[in-house]
Image (spheres, rainbow, N blue to C red):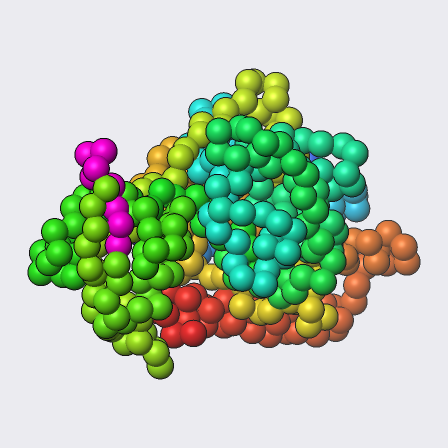
Amino acid sequence: MITTVLAFLLTLGVLIVVHEYGHYRVAVACGVKVLRFSVGFGRVIWRRQATPDSTEFVLCSLPLGGYVRMLDEREGTVAPAELERCFNRKPLLARTAIVAAGPLANLLLAVLLFAVAHWIGIAEPKAVLGPPAPASVAEAAGLRSGDWVRALSHDGSNWQDVLSMTDLRWEVTQAAMDGDTVHLTVSDRSGRGSRTVRLDLSKMSSREVDATLMQQIGLGAAFSEPVLGEAKAGGPAAAVGLRSGDRVLSVDGVPVSDAQTLRERIRAAPGVEMRWLFERGGQSLAVAVRPRAVKEGEREIGRIDAFVGQPPEMVTVRHGPVEGLVQGVQRTWEVSVLSLKMLGRMLIGEASLKNLSGPLTIADYAGQSVNQGLAYYLGFLALVSVSLGVLNLLPLPMLDGGHLMYYIFEAVTGRPVSDIWLARLQRGGIALLLTMMSIALFNDVVRLFGLQ
């Protein structure tokens, strides 16, 4: 819990400071006087100001945002000697640059973080597939448990290596969003028997771009050997003498090739005796296992009270200095485009509002990524930084993108938006943002507490 809270605060702190520093740095470069640089809102808990005329840097009690307050005639009386340092007196181009600098700083940070994560190297599951879901696109394409995906193509001509299961899911997700067809070059786990399969994603529903979508496509968990882990004392597995390291060969005479298949057989047999053939120390042994019945929602499932399956085989994905930076730029662009597509689809009802996430989900993922290592946390931080940059560029009042829309209007018409319309748009923007935040927080609660 403490790790999650600290990781969440660090994530917010880094992203807010970088965003506001973008505004601050460009404002200073454009000759605007910055009165306050604040991280957070509410009561000031830390303050530093070198001289009475310099910028006041503060840290406030509510760390869910920040702001840079600049000298502006619209917010109070300004001494004649300082009029030239007012934000509202600056040319349109300078004001546009100052407003755009915050989101752009977040996007540049994402490029750097993705690059550093690639330089460090990330341990990811090898792109060896578990059993495809029944009636899924993957099953229809002929993919099988244990297939190793080696390369991918969006057009059947230009191929790229698939570095890991994460890499494969990312490419397939983008293709599903666009309704494209994906071509895969696969072999067995040893690299033998290469063949090409075609995933037709043109009819896939992309309302929820998450594990549900991958299950629909048929690309669920990575391949895992049907080997047992620690058995709980007194449980069905321990009661019949099964131990950690036992490899299950067949159940009721049907061969078992992977852990996912074994788990499904166990779940489907609550209270039913099953004949297992397993291997231990090079010997084949037989045993009768009766999974205990437990309630899961409205139905009963079987449990043997033992961990089923080995961790998937891992590969380290690492790039050199130049390639890592190129990958950082490419991934930032791809995530930005995907985020905009999802927001657009949610706006027109083609994607579920369940895709909106709030602070609780961010905190949860921050804690998980920190526990997985530095490279994972940097990758997570980069994803959130992209999201923050893209969100702030949306043409909504109260956001940087809304102010940019005002400046576009001013550039086209030669006059600024009237105060009356600014007030109206401001109220509408507040209402819209509060609605989005409420939906995101509701999704967080439902997701984290398993209420769906």
Q: Where is the C terminus found, in terms of image quarters? A: bottom left
Question: Residue placed at 33% from the left, 51% from the top?
Answer: 250
Figure quadrant of residue 441: bottom left
Please indicate whether residue 10 sits to the left or right of residue 27 in the image. left
Q: Quick one: which residue is furthest to the right in this view?
A: 413
Question: Residue placed at 21% from the left, 61% from the top?
Answer: 289
Please indicate whether residue 378 sits to the left or right of residue 91 in the image. left
Instruction: Name the residue nearer the viewer: 195 or 382.
Output: 195
Q: How many marks?
A: 0
Q: Quick one: which residue is furthest to the top in this view?
A: 321
Q: Can you say whether 391 is above or below 191 in the image?
A: below
Question: Residue placed at 36% from the left, 42% from the top?
Answer: 225
Residue 281 forms part of the magenta stretch = yes
Residue 271 forms part of the magenta stretch = no
Can residue 302 be seen at all in this image of the molecule? yes
Magenta highlight: main SS: strand
Residue 230: percent from the left, percent from the top?
18, 47
Residue 403: percent from the left, percent from the top?
71, 56
Q: Can you say whether 242 is above or below 146 in the image?
A: below
What stretch of residues is rendered in magenta?
A: 276-283
Question: Residue placed at 45% from the left, 24% from the top?
Answer: 120
Q: Quick one: which residue is furthest to the front in this view?
A: 253
Residue 284: percent from the left, percent from the top?
23, 42
Instruction: Name the residue nearer the viewer: 292 or 388.
Output: 292
Instruction: Name the residue nearer the viewer: 421 or 197.
Output: 197
Please indicate whether residue 64 sits to the left or right of residue 5 in the image. right
Can residue 61 be seen at all in this image of the molecule? no
Instruction: Name the residue nearer the viewer: 349 or 422.
Output: 349
Figure quadrant of residue 155: top right
